[in-house]
Image (cartoon, rainbow, N blue to C red):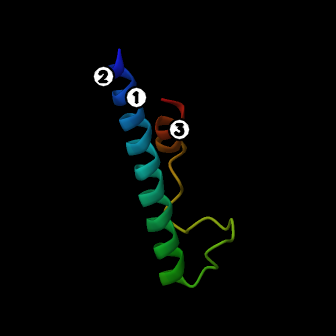
Amino acid sequence: MNHVEKTCEEQRASKEYIALIWKYSLRVKRREMGIPVNSDVPIPNRPVPKNLLKRIFNN
């Protein structure tokens, strides 16, 4: 039982880590293109794949 709980925590942590990396890469991309980092302006030619975000947060 304890092993299963640990696995779930590890899974959640890895998802949060993936999300952090994804957000960071978007911020870097925005900075390179001169778009304000905190704005909701989509990055040209690179829409955020919503299915990826759903996979990260809903699993």
User: Please, what secondary structure does the residue beneath circle 2 have?
Assistant: helix
Give the residue type at disc 1.
Answer: Cys
Query: Residue beneath label 1, please?
Result: 8
Give the residue type at disc 2.
Answer: His
Query: Residue beneath label 3, please?
Result: 57
Q: Percent position (x, y) of residue 7?
A: 34, 28
Bin the neighbour count of mark 2 within 10 Å (Cα to Cα): few under 14, some 14-19, many 20 and up: few
Query: Residue beneath label 2, please?
Result: 3
- Label 1 near label 3: C-beta < 8 Å? no
31 left or right of 21 in image: right
Q: Percent position (x, y) of residue 15?
A: 43, 43
Quadrant of the image containing the N terminus? top left
Q: Nearer the viewer, mark 2 or mark 3?
A: 2
Q: Nearer the viewer, mark 2 or mark 1?
A: 2
Q: Residue at x 53, y 38 (%)?
A: 57
Q: CA distance from mark 2 to mark 3?
A: 22 Å
Give the residue type at disc 3.
Answer: Phe
